[in-house]
Image: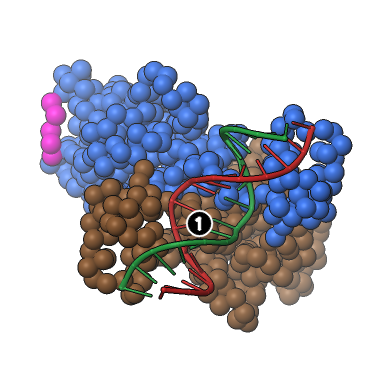
Chain colours: A brown, B blue, C red, D green
Amino acid sequence: MATMRDVAADAGVSPKTVSRVLNDDPHVSPATRERVERSMRALDYVPNAFATTFRSGRSPVVGVAVPDIVDPFFAAIVNAVEEAALADDLSTLVTSLGHDPARERPALESVVRRQLSGLVVAPTTNDHRYLAAWAARIPIAFVDRAPGGLVADAFLQDDRGGAREATAHLIGHGHTRIGFLGDALSAPTIAARLEGYRDALAEAGLPFDPALVALGAATRPGAADALAQLRAPELGVTAVFSSDARCTMAAVPAITAHPIALTAFGDFPLADSLTPSITVVAQDPAALGRLAAARLVERAAHPGRRLRRTTVLPVALVERDSCRIAPA
Amino acid sequence: MATMRDVAADAGVSPKTVSRVLNDDPHVSPATRERVERSMRALDYVPNAFATTFRSGRSPVVGVAVPDIVDPFFAAIVNAVEEAALADDLSTLVTSLGHDPARERPALESVVRRQLSGLVVAPTTNDHRYLAAWAARIPIAFVDRAPGGLVADAFLQDDRGGAREATAHLIGHGHTRIGFLGDALSAPTIAARLEGYRDALAEAGLPFDPALVALGAATRPGAADALAQLRAPELGVTAVFSSDARCTMAAVPAITAHPIALTAFGDFPLADSLTPSITVVAQDPAALGRLAAARLVERAAHPGRRLRRTTVLPVALVERDSCRIAPA
DNA sequence: TTGTAAGCGTTATCAT
DNA sequence: ATGATAACGCTTACAA
C-alpha cells in the first residue's frame, strides 16, 4: 500500500506537498500538482483514512443507537440518520441496545469511545448522567425519548397529546370503559401516553380505573394475556388503547381473532391491511432521525450556537376500521 | 483528555508500562499494576481507540451493506451481523445501498476504504469485479445473493428449490394457471425463483406461459397493476406465486381486497395475521447474517484456511390460508 | 520487571 | 510555492 511518502518520493516533492494536493490547497503550482497527481495514480495511492482520522481526533462517523433495529420504527430512524449523514460524507455506526436497560450504558460507552462525530440515541433508560463527559466533547441527540439528568438535544413526538387524541376518539365512538395496553410504565414515553389516556378520560368526565391498565404486552403471549385480562366480563371493557406499536403488533393475532374497538399509538407496516385495519396515531420516525442527524452536523459546525434543545413533533390520527367496532 | 503519558507521569512509570497494564501483559509487578490502575482511574483515562487502530492498521469494525434496512429481511440480517460482531468486540458500520444498482459501487468503495475488519454485503448488482482488490485484503462475505465475477464467501438460500416447492404447492391445490409476481428478473435471486417456478410447472406437465409473469411489483401501485394484469379473464389465472417478500407486502392490499390463491417466497411480519394469512416459503435472514459474520471472523483468524465458499440454506414452506383458496 | 527509542501516515507550524 | 520538523497516542523492538 503506497503512502504519502512514496508518492512524494516518486514525484520528487515533499510529503507536505502531496498533502496539499490532496486537500486542494491553492498554494501548489499547476505543474507540481500535475506531477503529484500522476504519481498518485501510478502508485494507486489511497490516503490512509486512519492516519487522517487519528490526526484530526475525530472520525467521520455518526453513531446511532436504538433498542431494536428490526422494529420498523427504529429502522426508519436509522435509515433517516444514515441518509442525512451520507449527505455530509459521514458513515453510520449502528448499535442495537436491546430492550434491557442494563445494556444501554456499556453499549453507548463503547460506541462513544470511538470518538465519532456525533451520536443519535433512542435510549432505553431514564438516567444519562454517565454521558455528561462525552456530551461535552461530541454532539449527542436523543430521539423518541428525552434524556434523563442530562441537557442534550431531543427530538420527540407528542406522546401525551397523541394518546389523548386516540383515547378521545374511542370515547367519541361511545366507549366509556377503555383498556390501556402497554409494555412497562418505566418507559417515559409509555408513562406520558398513560397521562394522555387519563387526560382524555378526565376531559370526558370518565373515571380512571387502574384495573384497566394491562402491561407486559410486548410479546405475543404477553399481549394475549393482557387482552384476555381486559376482556374479563366484570371489567366491562369495550375498547382498547394500545400505547405502543410493538405491543399493537404483538396483540394483532388476539385482535383479529376476537375484534375489539382499538386505537393505537404508532403506525406499522400493513396496519391498514389487517382485518380490521388499525386506527393509529402516526409518528414520523424518519423526521426524528433526519432532524437529529441535521442537528449533530449543525452543532459540530457551530459549537456555540444556542438552539432549542427539545423539539416535539406532532402526531396524526389515521382513522381506519378498528375504532369503529361498536361497544358490545 | 488524559493520555497514556499523563497516566505514566502520574504513576511514575514509563508509558510502555501503562500500555502493558492495559494489555494485560503478565510482565508487570502487581504493585506497579496497582499504581497504574489507580492513576488511570484518577485521571479518567480512556485509551484513544484511534491511536490503537492506526497503529494496528485495521479497525475493529465490520461493515454490513444491504439494499434497505427498513426491509425486515435485511434488518434481520443486519441485526444478526451486529450481534455476532459484538461477541467479538467488533462494531458494525451499516450502509444502505438502495435499490438502484448504480449506487452499490461507490457506496461499497467508500465503506471498504475505511479498512474495516470485514464486510458483509447483500448486493444489488451482479458484477463485483471492482471488489477484487479489496477482497484480497479483507474478508468479504455475500449474503442473499452470490457475488458476480468474484470468488468470495456466500451465504444464500435455496431460491430455486423454495420457489419450486411454493409453486408445486399451488399445483397440489389444483391450480394449473399460476401467475408469477416479481420485481425484476435482473436480480439473480428472482431469476432463480422463476426457474424454480418453471421447474414445478414442468414437473407437473404444465406449460410455461410468459404472459403469466408480471413484474414491477415492488411498490403498492406496481403490485396492484401486476395483479390486475394477471387477473385478466382471458389468462385464466387462479393462483399466484409471489417471488419476493417486498412484492408480497406491496401486493397485500390488492390480495386482501380480492383474495386469490397465493404462495410467496419470504416470510414477513404479520403474514400470519392477514385475511387470508399468507402461505410462505420462509428464509432465515438471521442465520445468513450470523454465518456471514462468523465467517469473517474465521477468515481473519485463519487467512489460509480452505472453506466451502458457498453455503445454501434450506427454506421451509409455512402453510397458512392463502394457498387454500379454491380455483374460481 | 521496566524503560528507551523509533515509527505508524498524516497534517500544522514555521521557515525559506 | 515548497519544505523541514514536530506532533497526534500508541505499540513494537530492543535494551537494561
Figure quadrant of the N terminus of chain A: top left
- Residue that badge 1 annotates: A53
**Picture coordinates of residue B110, whole percent (x, y):** 37, 52
Closest to the observer: B138 or A272?
Answer: B138
Dominant SS in magenta: loop
Closest to the observer: B182 or C2?
Answer: C2
- Label 1 CA crowd tier, 10 Å (few <14, some 14–19, many 20+): some
Magenta-colored span: B207-211
Mark 1 residue element: helix
Closest to the observer: B276 or B40?
Answer: B40
Residue at 60% across, 56% down: A115
Numbered marks: total: 1
Indicate left or right for B116 with B33 as reference: left
Closest to the observer: B155 or B195?
Answer: B155
Residue at 68% across, 67% down: A136
Residue at 71% across, 52% down: B5
